Image (tube, rainbow, N blue to C red):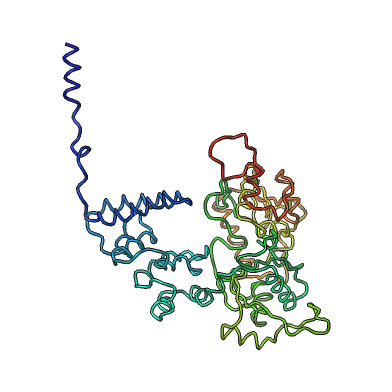
Amino acid sequence: MLARTLARRRLFPAAVPARALSTPAPGPNDAIVRLLSQHLDDENASPSRNPYKVRSFQTAINAVRRAQHPILTGQEAAKLKGIGPRIAQRIEFFLNGKDYGKSSHSILASPLTQDPTARHSARTAAELADAGCTSIEDLHRREYYLDILSKTQRAKLDHADHLRQEVTREEAENVADFIRHHIASQFELHLMGDYRRDRPTAPKIELLLLHPSYVHVPVPPAPPAVHFPKTTRGNRPQPFRPKHRAAPAGTAPLLAHVVRPLRDAGLLATPLHAYPSRWQGIALLPARASAGAGGDREARRWAEVGERLRDIRARRGSYRPIELSLAPVKSRGAAVLALTGDAEFVAALRIAATKLGMYLNEYGLWRWHPNRRTQGPRDGAGVDVDVESELTSEEESTKEESAEESAKEEGESGYWELIQAESEAAIFEELGMPWVPPEKRNFGFLKETRPSARRGRPRKTPPALL
């Protein structure tokens, strides 16, 4: 009996659903599925394989397969859940018989769509492609330039060739010297970013300004409104850029005492993004007049203001991206730390602070004390965080205080203690870390310092900082 049962099982295996044994019926969008599958294979075979892009292709393929109607345009594809603007653009090019090569998607690789602060740049690129714009040259046509591009994107396009060029150390130093010559002498000015990390070139000029009268230290919102980072993944916080964007008042100290005189002096050509404590734009590199006696650099005069303003109007000269940040003088150490970078290094420091029950931002190292109502934030390191100054915009301060009170009402009750803000070295010490010289503050250096005993896939968060 048992032998007959086993024989029957060998001769007549369990029934298998017909769908599992048959080839899937062709769908209305098989050609698009084959296209995306080819792009998926190309990405998997690439030496610089991007797992996020692989996942995007897989999701898009499934979305197209589920579609019950033929997809006729990229806009229709973009309406499907799981298809983003870039994949929709690939589909649009395919349906129009165009090759999605380097020349086809040069818009996406251009400076006007690569700015991380421009949230809708990829969407704009897809909109341009849908309208028939397939190259940087096409962008200058009136129907694209005026009807689709924003004012900020038009400014980037006008200076696209300049924005692609790196900033040399000499160029950055000349800009810093020019600024010192044209703003109040009480300001301190420091070159940050790649310059402070001793790199030979940088993608932009980053400057930190401090003033003895600018001392108001904004307090973080109460938990859970404040984000305690636990991983290096995700978007990096940008120092001195508020989470909720609002047009800065014209009396904000950075605009009134720094940006305006530098614009009038013919340095700042075009604004891109403006916040109360941060300004991003495009600067005309300053040139000095002919050398005086002995050719002393400090004794040489700058070119006439009128000449510089005429150059800006005519778009003559060389231009570079520039970022100006104004920090409270009592947040000197935290501001320098945040603006020196690099992004991976700063992210690792913020994670280290979180693991110690603290919060690190560009204004200082903080500790939250819950369940206690107080009149205001406490001073943990001899720093008066409530002092208003002659340079602090009354409107800005009121806005910060109201946001802070709103966050307290919605979050936990308690207060922030400012542990350290004035010294980089002291912040490292509070985090239990040795001093790291600026030139070694990059992710490559940190990976070299971690122990090699652990096997398996390397961690993105450097244990050396934890």
- Residue at 69% x, 74% y: name it: 175
In the rendered image of this protein, does residue 203 appear above or below residue 174? above
**Identity of the residue furthest to the right in this view:** 294
Q: Nearer the viewer, residue 201 or 158?
A: 201
Q: Is residue 263 left or right of residue 61?
A: right
Q: Does residue 323 appear anywhere in the picture?
A: no
Q: Position of residue 297 (x, y in %)?
A: 78, 77
Q: Is residue 8 left or right of residue 415?
A: left
Q: Does residue 212 appear anywhere in the picture?
A: yes
In the rendered image of this protein, does residue 201 appear above or below residue 298? above
Q: Position of residue 281 (x, y in %)?
A: 59, 72
Q: Position of residue 360 (x, y in %)?
A: 65, 51
Q: Position of residue 164 (x, y in %)?
A: 55, 69
In the rendered image of this protein, does residue 142 appear above or below residue 77? below
Q: Quadrant of residue 81?
A: bottom left
- Residue at 65% x, 70% y: name it: 394
| Quadrant location, the C terminus | top right
Q: Nearer the viewer, residue 137 or 214?
A: 137
- Residue at 39% x, 63% y: name it: 101
